[in-house]
Image: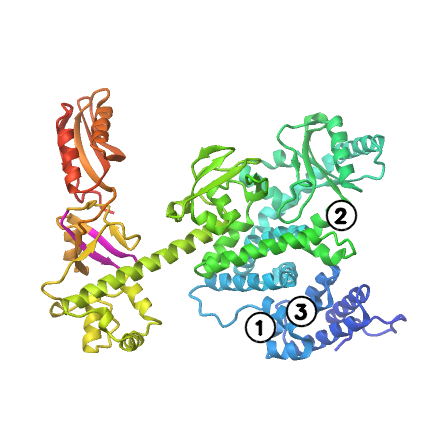
Amino acid sequence: MSSYAVADAPPPQEPAETPQEKLARRLGHLTSSYLEPAQVAEIQKAYEVAAKAHEGQFRLSGEPYVCHPLSVAIILAEMRMDAKGIMAALLHDVIEDTPLTKEDLSARFGAEVAELVDGVSKLTQLDCKSRAEAQAENVRKMVLAMVKDLRVIMVKLADRLHNMRTLDVMNPGRRCRIARETLDIYAPIAHRLGMNEVRLELENLGFSAMYPMRHRVLEQCVKKARGNRKEVLATIESTLKARLKDCGMPDARIIGREKHLYSLYQKMRSKHLPFAQVYDVYAFRIVVDSPDECYRALGAVHNLYKPIPGRFKDYIALPKANGYQSLHTVLIGPFGLPLEIQIRTHAMHHMAESGIAAHWLYKSETDPAAGSQARAREWLRDLLEIQKSAGDSLEFLDNLKVDLFQHECYVFTPKGRIIKLPRGATIVDFAYAVHTDIGNSCVSARVNRILAPLHSVLENGQTIEIITAPWARPNPLWLNYVVTAKARAAIRSHLRNFKKQEAVNLGRRLLEKELANHGLNLEAIPPQQLENFTRSLELASFESLLEDLGLGNRLPFLVVQQMLHGERESGKGAPSPAAEKSARMPLVIKGTEGVVVNLAKCCRPIPGDPIVGFFNPGKGIVVHLTDCKNAAELRRKQINSLDVEWDRAASGMFPAMIRLELMNRVGTLAQVASAISRMEADIENVQITNQDDQISTDVITIGVKDRVHLARVMRELRRLSIVLKISRVKSELRK
């Protein structure tokens, strides 16, 4: 087993080195160039443990398995990662692939290294229904470990980078799956952390693995086009240098910049452009010494070539979320071609290429990466809040992807605080970005002092003032237009908890009603008896039983029978005819119980109507009119039902549908709307189902208080001379 300590004298002639020995020697050379000898010795010890643990294991390429952790450690050493991070890289697969445990590593190398290795390790003992769920759970675990220590994601990205470099030996299906995961998750995370060099390589390798033919064709096109551009690039570069020198910046560095292949491919796809139009853009990067010189250089290039309006971005004054800073401008260059210019300082350039890795690459007293570290930790804190709100790992992964694929928009609070949001963000996204409680209770907003609806899309520079109310709560419709992961997770969490509480309340009422049919009271049953009964049903708590009842997963009369007779069935399934009582107290509803009591959309029952309820497992109770055609169909299918009736104190507006046959004249709908308004009813929807020169048949959905109110509205409409026939719609639009 080879040590990688650096020898002072040239090594004697020996047999050719193995790949493992070459990698070990290279790692030794890199680490000893910036770490203390004691730290290098600790890394040596970690290497020896990893080599011994992986002994006899080989990669698909045929090389010893330990070559992989060595390569990962080398990638991190090139970023000047600290000793603990290098040790974690060397040991990152031992928990997963060898008998060594986290406790073993903690005893040998300390808790810090053990925690890092555990954070990178996959969850091998997962009870997951699908590969997607397993992937989501692993990403969730990794993100939680990232929150504790940023080095976890550094090791994971280096691990993924080396895996992508050696992907060719895998079968096409697995290669494609790993490449998709890289492009969907790991490359965006590298971008979010400002690690541009890692991101570009991951994207190009992923693109090559996913679409080898497209990658090859695009690569050939770029090589061919590059030769035709050399003269133009040289002309532009010399002109820029001369202008900057005249402006007192002779040391400014000018770099010709090419779009990498995956970026070209994405642009061609998203904008439906041929290669010639995408590649017909010349790009340069100007690197100067100070922020002041950045703005002077901007003025110089704007005097040289005309800027394109609306294409200037100042990321120095308003850095991106990952800490990226630069001035961006697009000019009309020579020959009328677009010319992209990025202007930044040397420190900004290091940050743009390395992101949080600059913390280790360029560590100094003035640590230029401190801002990036702070932003990364702020982002990770947001992820932690999102994961707390997520229902499961798949929902969390969905929220993470939403959070990763976004471009910034900058808006202000009334006090002048800048809030960064993704493009397309709405007022609701802004409210949740300020604080979760603000989002949960927002009812309206002022944009630049003008009232605006909550679905309004925000634009750069707007000032937003949120209006809240103590009674307000999130609306499920918000999920149709919010774009930030934080808002989406918070809304889903609130609705999930709200539904659970509503289900528990309804379940309690159903159980109390059924017990009352037997002359019993829930309060009179000893808590210990309830606990024993719940345990016999293999449920975690009595509240879980009530939730099941409210969601329609268990039937109240069967549960009561088991409670009274000590039966051990699950409480699910259809009851026997003898089990049903001939007369039961009906469940009294107000129609405003929430998401677990739903009024059927086919017949639109309103207070005063004779109604019947049907259990809908997982969703609660659906209430139909007793003479609804769909209710008859449900009875025929022996769907479990219960007697319900309207509470006399039911209040609010309820939708009801009426069919009108009208004379087809100018102003007919206006007369109908006026009559409905006079009767203090609301029009919710108008649907024209049939129309000719003489007659129009319309179905109108109106909001009414109860059956009496609906009758008064229909009487008022009958008085209109244009109304030929009117009737209430019952069970014709099945949903």
Q: Which mark is residue 96?
A: 1
The residue under label 2 is which amino acid type?
Ala
Q: Observer-nearest residue: 388 or 339?
A: 388
Please give left or right for residue 144 compared with residue 319 in the image. Answer: left
Q: Which mark is residue 347?
A: 2
Q: Observer-nearest residue: 355 or 462?
A: 462
Task: From the top left corner, tell me how far across and down residue 595 is, in percent.
Answer: 31, 53
Q: Residue at 43% across / 59% down in the picture?
A: 391
Residue at mark 3: 88
Q: From this viewpoint, which residue is outermost toward the right?
A: 9
Q: Observer-nearest residue: 495 or 252?
A: 495
How far apart in space, not on screen, are marks 3 and 1 (Cα)?
Answer: 13 Å
Q: Is residue 735 visible?
A: yes
Q: Determine the image quadrant of residue 161.
A: bottom right
How far apart in space, not on screen, are marks 2 and 1 (Cα)?
Answer: 39 Å
Instruction: Give the prevailing secondary structure in the magenta stretch.
Output: strand
Q: Secondary structure at mark 3?
A: helix
